[in-house]
Image (cartoon, rainbow, N blue to C red):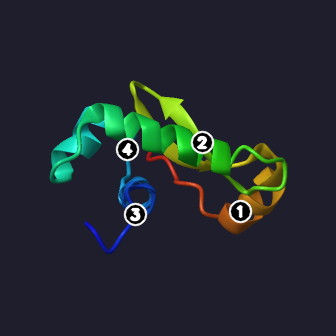
Amino acid sequence: MEQFSLDNIILALLFASDEPLPAKRIASVLDEVDAADVRESLGRLESRFAGEDSAIRLEQVAGGYQLCTSPNYSDYVARLYRGRRKQRLS
């Protein structure tokens, strides 16, 4: 872990996860890092993405943390997924 910063490792885990990650779960993946260190890092990441111009936000969801797009960019994201709606069986 020495060659990568804790913030960037956590960012990679959040990006790769398909569900919100609690601080304890993130800490369990990392060596010599406890949940308090993870929460401190998450605070830095949240501040980093808090600016109005950032397209990414860090949100607390369902007892964990998840990356999401800023609402300012929702129109563009919606265009990306236009026409990809699941069809329901009758």
Amino acid type for the residue under numbered disc 2: Glu
Residue 83: x %, y % from top left: 67, 64
Indicate left or right for 17 with 43 as reference: left
What amino acid does circle 1 point to?
Arg
List x then y, in percent, for residue 32: 16, 49
Q: Residue at x 28, y 68 (%)?
A: 2
Residues 2 and 82: in front is: 2
> Badge 1 local density, few (<14 within 10 Å), some, or many (20+)?
few
User: Alpha-carbon distance for marks 2 and 1?
Assistant: 29 Å
State how far apart marks 1 and 4 are (Cα).
23 Å
Q: What residue did someone put label 2 on?
A: 46
- Residue at the location (60% across, 63% down)? 84
Pick whichever of labels 4 and 3 is earlier in the sequence: 3
Q: Amino acid at mark 3?
A: Ser
Residue named by callout 3: 5
**Most foreground residue, 3 or 86:** 3
The residue wearing badge 1 is 82
Q: Mark 2 against mark 1, which lies toward the viewer?
A: 2
